[in-house]
Image: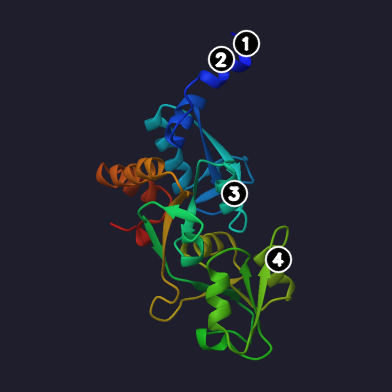
Amino acid sequence: MPVEAQAQTQPQPTSRAEAVRARGELRVCIWPDYFAITWRNPRNDELAGIDIDLARDLARRLGVRPVFVETNFRDFMGRLEQGTCDVAMFGIGMTPQRAARVEFARPYLSSAVYAVTTRDNPVITRWEDIDQPGNSVAVAAGTYMEPLMRQTLRHATLVSLAPPQTREAELQSGRVDVFMSDFPYTRRMVMTQEWVRIIEPPQGFGETRYAHAVAKGDPAWLAVVDGFVAAAREDGTLARAAERNGLTPILLR
């Protein structure tokens, strides 16, 4: 029988779970600039963070090896839809806009939105100073902060930044006055930069739950990822990963 005919008669995987096991690898979408979540350390080029730990554990439980695919919040949904990634694991906020395109497993973290400015900024010293005429407020393109701040700001100008632009560089240069981020990212800023001032939000502003995402149309694969999160919570894997990466304060129990 010709090779082509043999290939056609071979049973095809009916779920991504079967495809992952047949392939022997789990392709995980990550954003390598996300401190404590999926962060590539520039000193040794190694990946670390809660979702790096969890992705490796999910791959281990499936009996395959993890392969990390770098993307960002703007492009990851297209990656899932195209099949470039089997799952996106990098602290993805569960928003209605994203839920229209991808499926979410159960949430495991939750964070409010914080403001980051410079210590010597005389204009912005408290939350009420942010939304004022003449101020520029930066967000990373594709993050849930983008639609949130677009709806929230009435007087300040919203600036959406896509790579290679970074919020830190734009803030330090004076091209923006403040940028918005979450608990993991602002924790990195506090730990590594002496020039930053973190402004805490009032009453959990922008509180959003984070989850892992898969493409629509495969309930069996979603059940595998969702079941993994449930098992990791039950056996303590999730709590240990959160503690190891300084994220216990935002861990969902």
Q: Is residue 180 visible?
A: no
Numbered label attached to residue 32: 3
Q: How is the image coloured?
A: rainbow
Name the residue nearer the viewer: 108 or 167: 108
- Left or right: residue 84 compared with residue 13: right
Residue that badge 4 annotates? 169
Numbered label attached to residue 2: 1
Disc 3 to disc 1, how far (Cα)?
44 Å
Residue type pointed to by label 2? Gln
Residue that badge 2 annotates? 6
Residue type pointed to by label 4? Ala
Determine whether label 4 and label 1 are within 8 Å by CB: no
**Badge 4 or badge 1: first in the primary sequence:** 1
**Badge 3 or badge 2: first in the primary sequence:** 2
Disc 2 element: helix
- State which mark lies toward you, 3 or 1: 1
Residue type pointed to by label 3? Pro
Give the class, few, some or many, for how many residues have Cα within 10 Å of label 4's Cα (few <14, many ≥20).
few
Give the class, few, some or many, for how many residues have Cα within 10 Å of label 1's Cα (few <14, many ≥20).
few
